[in-house]
Image (cartoon, rainbow, N blue to C red):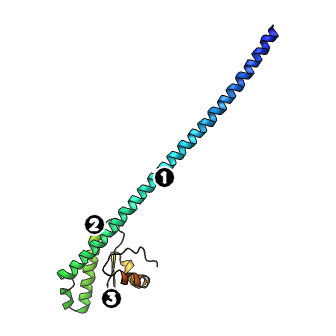
C-alpha cells in the first residue's frame, strides 16, 4: 500500500512540476511579449513626439528668419528713404561710403539684436558690396554668393529668399 501511495505521490509531484514549468514558461513568454510590445509602442510614441517637436522648432526658425529678413529690408528701405544714405551722398565720396557702411551695418546690428536666433546678417547691394554684422564675413562673401545665386536672385527680384550658408 505504501508503494502504491508513493507511486501516486510521485506521479502527482511529477505532474505538478511539469505543470509549474509550463505555467512559468507561459508567464515568461507572455511577459516578454507584453513588455516588448509596450516598449515598441512607447518608443514609437516618443519618436513621433520628438519628430513633431523638431518640425515645430524648425518651422519657428524659418518664420523667425522670414520676419528678420522682412525687418532688415524695411529698415534698409527706411535708411534709403529717410535720408541716412541719400543726404550723405553729397559729401566726399569716401565719407559717403563710410556713412553708408555705418548706416547699413547699424541697422543690420539693431535687427540682429531683436532676432537673437540669427547668428549673422549680411546685405549685398546691387554693386556687389557686402555689409554684415560680422566683419569677417564681408571680404569674400559677395563674389561667392553672387556667383552661386545670381540666376536665383534675378528670378526672385523684389522678394525675400532664403539661400542658406554660402560655402567657402
Which circle marks residue 47 in the picture? Answer: 1
Q: Mark 3 points at which residue?
A: 127
Front residue (pair 99, 34): 34
Say which element carries label 2: helix
Residue furthest to the top: 1
Camera-side mark, 1 or 2: 1
The Cα atoms of the two marked residues, 1 and 2, are separated by: 33 Å
Q: Residues within 10 Å of mark 1 (few under 14, many from 20)?
A: few
Q: Name the residue under label 2.
A: 114
Q: Tell me which numbered mark, 3 or 1, is placed earlier along the sequence.
A: 1
Note whether residue 19 is visible. Answer: yes
What residue lies at 22% left-to-right and 82% top-to-bottom? Answer: 80
Say which element carries label 3: loop
Camera-side mark, 3 or 1: 1
Q: Which quadrant is the N terminus positioned in?
A: top right
Front residue (pair 30, 86): 30
What residue lies at 82% left-to-right and 11% top-to-bottom? Answer: 3
Q: Residues within 10 Å of mark 2 (few under 14, many from 20)?
A: few
Q: Report x, y in % for residue 119.
A: 36, 69
Q: In this view, does 100 lie to the left or right of 63?
A: left
Amino acid at each position: 500500500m505504501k508503494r502504491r501511495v508513493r507511486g501516486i505521490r510521485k506521479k502527482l509531484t511529477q505532474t505538478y512540476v511539469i505543470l509549474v514549468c509550463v505555467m512559468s514558461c507561459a508567464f515568461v513568454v507572455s511577459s516578454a511579449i507584453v513588455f516588448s510590445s509596450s516598449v515598441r509602442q512607447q518608443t514609437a510614441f516618443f519618436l513621433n513626439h520628438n519628430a513633431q517637436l523638431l518640425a515645430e522648432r524648425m518651422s519657428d526658425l524659418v518664420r523667425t528668419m522670414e520676419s528678420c529678413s522682412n525687418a532688415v529690408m524695411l529698415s534698409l528701405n527706411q535708411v534709403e528713404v529717410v535720408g541716412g544714405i541719400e543726404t550723405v551722398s553729397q559729401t566726399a565720396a569716401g565719407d559717403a561710403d563710410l556713412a553708408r557702411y555705418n548706416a547699413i551695418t547699424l541697422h543690420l546690428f539693431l535687427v540682429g539684436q531683436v532676432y537673437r536666433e540669427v547668428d549673422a546678417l549680411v546685405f549685398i547691394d546691387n554693386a556687389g558690396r557686402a555689409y554684415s554684422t560680422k566683419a569677417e564675413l564681408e571680404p569674400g562673401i559677395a563674389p561667392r554668393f553672387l556667383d552661386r545665386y545670381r540666376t536665383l536672385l534675378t528670378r526672385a527680384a523684389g522678394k525675400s529668399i532664403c539661400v542658406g550658408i554660402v560655402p567657402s
